[in-house]
Amino acid sequence: MRRIPIEYAKEGDVLGKTLYNEMGGMLLKEGSNLNWYMIEKLKSYGYLSIYIKDKYTEEDIEEIIKPEVVNRIYSLQGSLNNVIRGSSNENKIDSKKVRSHVKNLNEIIKEVAYDIVSSKNVLENLASISIYDDYTLTHSLNMMMLSIVIARDIGFNMNEIKSLATGCVFHDIGKIFLPIELINKPGKFTDEEFSLVQSHTEKGYRFLTDHTDLSAVSRNISLCHHEREDGLGYPRGLKGDEIHIFNKIASISDVFDALTSDRPYRRAVPLHDAMEYLLASGGNHFDIDLIKVFSQSINVFPKDTFVHLSDNREGIVYEINSEFHTRPKIKVYGENGKKVAPYIINLKEHNNIVIEKVIHVFSFDKTN
Ligand SMILES: [Fe+2]
């Protein structure tokens, strides 16, 4: 299974992951044979990419968070949002209902955190999270998963990981108090709009403090996930050691997931480009040591990714090398634009060859 931009989808491709609408209802089931009508329909719904299985990529990738669990989180978060939106102002929110939804959500998050920490395949599967068209929900879950993996790899204990995970799920809760048009606005914000957007940190923190029993470190993530190492972040402009490690981790996962997700106004950046960006910004924006851990923890070339190699071969990522995941085994299908009988090459044993770029179709297939 692999993720492709929607314009590369063609009749006969098999949908790799079930797609849901914004109400959590099923739009198209995994395993559906795509036809022209369905592809056009998905485009009209605003999907920019989908997961497919085709003749090259038949194997299923195990979901880290099972779709049923995602749906439970989705519906609880929906109920929580309704309680907040249903109140006439921020002071009239029904705290009792909020506490009950947050408590239930927290129970599921704990289970999920445990599953992620104990999953051996997390490296392979991390980039295969279901695509929902509710960006805030998907983003919160993705960001939580990435944060948990970093925390696990720097040796946090399970209690710390759970607190971090909870804080991540609620990190952008403050956005619910902002106009939706502003959150989805393409292009640049005016100064006034930007300061309103920035206020989601303080609004979220105030909400969590007033209406939930979350711990201080969890709540702090909503306040501090936009702080930067160099002090140029917001809302307080904290620097380096003034920023709690949970918030440092959250800011890395937040930016990485935002870059690698489709937005209404721009397509997702490939995982390896997003990682390059983070590595290049480390020190100014992020904690450089955490970025190093992150780059070791996250596999930017998941299994089944189509790749173009520096020696003009093309193939798919066949087996991940867990010590050095930029050098996986590749099943080669093409050389110099010509189809060849498939064979395996292990990049770990060929230091002179690198993955040059991710592609979505083999060049020898383009002419067909
Ligand atoms: Fe945020």
Image (spheres, rainbow, N blue to C red):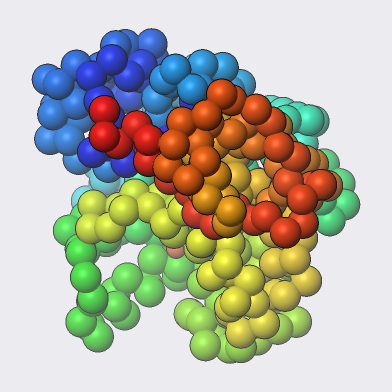
In front of the other: 306 or 104: 306
Q: Is residue 98 above or below residue 14?
A: below
Q: Is residue 286 above or below residue 96?
A: below
From the top left corner, tell me how far across and down residue 321 is, in percent: 77, 40
**In the image, what residue occupies the spot 34% across and 49% down?**
262
From the top left corner, tell me how far across and down residue 59 is, in percent: 56, 17
In front of the other: 243 or 28: 28
Left or right: residue 40 compared with residue 335: left
Ligand 1 shows up in which quadrant of the image?
Answer: bottom left
From the top left corner, tell me how far across and down residue 286 is, in percent: 63, 75
Quadrant containing the C terminus in the rendered view: top left
**In the image, what residue occupies the spot 32% across and 41% down?**
5
Residue 303 visible within the image: no
Total labels: the figure holds 0
**In the image, what residue occupies the spot 19% across and 16% down?**
35
Instruction: Give the quadrant of residue 364.
Output: top left
Left or right: residue 263 compared with residue 247: left
Residue 338 visible within the image: yes
Q: Is residue 341 above or below residue 157?
A: above
**In the image, what residue occupies the spot 28% across and 58% down?**
266
Q: Is residue 273 above or below residue 40?
A: below
From the top left corner, tell me how far across and down residue 128 is, in percent: 53, 34
In front of the other: 201 or 230: 230
Instruction: Give the quadrant of residue 186.
Output: bottom left
